[in-house]
Image (cartoon, rainbow, N blue to C red):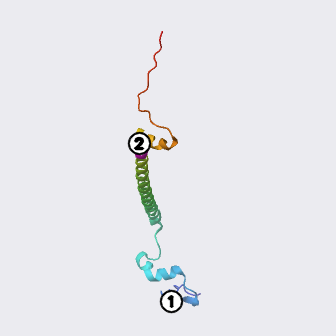
Amino acid sequence: MSQNTFKKKIKQGSNPGGKKKTLFTLIEEKLNVTGILGEGIPVKFGPPFFFAAFLAMIYIWSNHRADNMIRKIEKMQQEVEDLRADVTTLEAEYMLSSKQSEVAKKIQPLGIYEIDEPPIKIKNKK
């Protein structure tokens, strides 16, 4: 009967059987993950890690959303200021054009003239 023996461990960095290296094996070699974590990541660290990653994603999304909202608000404030300036200009032009002297100047070419006398009040005799 043969005796039980351990398998020979493959040295890091060697490529057994001439197989092509994958992205993950390259990352593992460069970062030396097995030196830090041992042979694998303990399962008990999974849920807290995923929860922290989920909170980080919510935080990033929230900041991104807030930045977009601030940009929209600033754009709208600029648009409101422009519209307010336009309204003020139009109101000033309207007030100027509705003056009695301006109206008289505009209707003079039509042959309509302004009355110099005050209107006469008609009294009803009974």
Q: Given the image, on which type of amino acid does mark 1 rest?
A: Ser
Mark 2 neighbour class, 10 Å CA radius: few under 14, some 14 to 19, many 20 or more: few
* Residue marked by disc 1: 14
Q: Nearer the viewer, residue 109 or 91?
A: 109
Q: Is residue 58 above or below residue 16?
A: above
Q: Given the image, on which type of amino acid does mark 2 rest?
A: Met
Q: Nearer the viewer, residue 77 or 29?
A: 77
* Residue marked by disc 2: 95
The residue tagged with tag 1: helix, strand or loop? loop
Nearest to viewer (mark 2 / mark 1): 2
Residue 87 in the image, given as x and y percentages of width and height: 43, 47
Q: Nearer the viewer, residue 104 or 49?
A: 104
Residue 71 in the image, given as x and y percentages of width and height: 43, 58
The residue tagged with tag 2: helix, strand or loop? helix
Residue range in magenta is 91-98
Left or right of 1 in this view: 40: left
Q: Quadrant of residue 16?
A: bottom right
User: What residue is at 47 percent from the left and 74 percent from the top?
Assistant: 40
Tell me which numbered mark, 2 or 1, is placed earlier along the sequence: 1
Name the main secondary structure of what is drawn in magenta. Answer: helix
Q: Quadrant of residue 115?
A: top left
